[in-house]
Image (cartoon, grey):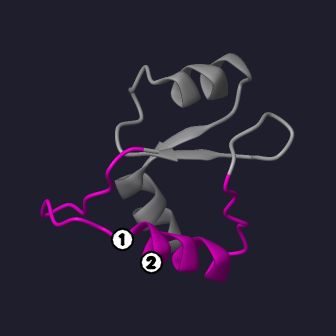
């Protein structure tokens, strides 16, 4: 959720992040739901967006884009 940037501030394309997620065993989804997601990747993990609030309320992990990139390497 949100605009993704790498550590140097360059924009990251959502499609490229989805390919990276898939290659690491994750299944990107179009719509966010409690039963359909295991983790939320957010531009700002401290965001109080609707999606981030829901994820946190459900006890779902919220990772920043950079944390996701570090994990996926």
Given the current orientation, which residue lies at the most extreme right position? 35
Q: What predominant SS class does the magenta segment belong to?
A: loop
31 left or right of 4 in image: right
x and y, in percent, of residue 41 in the image: 51, 48
The correct choice, above or below, for 24 with respect to 14 in the image is below
Q: CA distance from mark 2 to mark 1?
A: 5 Å
Q: Which residue is mark 1?
A: 13
Rendered residue at 59%/71% (across/down): 21
Q: Which quadrant would residue 22 be assigned to in this image?
A: bottom right
- Name the residue located 14 percent from the left edge and 59 percent from the top edge: 9
3 vs 63, left or right, is left
**Does the magenta portion include 38?**
no
Q: x, y percentage for residue 40?
A: 59, 44
| Location of residue 63 in the rendering, given as x and y in whole percent from the top left corner | 50, 44
60 in relation to 66, above or below: above
Mark 2, Cα crowd under 10 Å, few <14 / some 14-19 / many 20+, is few
Q: Quadrant of residue 56?
A: top right
66 up-or-down from 61: above or below: below
Q: Do tag 2 and tag 1 residues touch (Cβ < 8 Å)?
A: yes
In this picture, which residue range is highlighted in magenta?
2-30
In the rendered structure, the answer to whether residue 40 lies left or right of residue 27 reads: left
Question: Percent from the top left, x then y, of residue 39?
Answer: 66, 46
Tag 1 secondary structure: loop
Does the magenta-highlighted stretch encompass residue 7? yes
| Label placed on residue 43 | none
Which residue is label 2 attached to?
16
Residue at image location 56% in from the left, 80% down from the top = 19
Q: Which residue is at a point 53% across and 23% down the rendered structure image? A: 50
Q: Of residues 64 and 10, which is closer to you in this image? A: 10
């Amino acid at each position: 959720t949100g605009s993704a940037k790498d550590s140097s501030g360059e924009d990251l394309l959502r499609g490229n992040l989805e390919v990276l997620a898939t290659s690491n065993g994750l299944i990107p989804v179009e719509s966010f739901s409690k039963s359909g997601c295991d983790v939320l990747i957010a531009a700002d993990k401290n965001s109080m967006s609707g999606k981030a609030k829901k994820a946190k309320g459900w006890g779902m992990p919220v990772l920043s884009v950079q944390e996701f990139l570090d994990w996926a390497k």
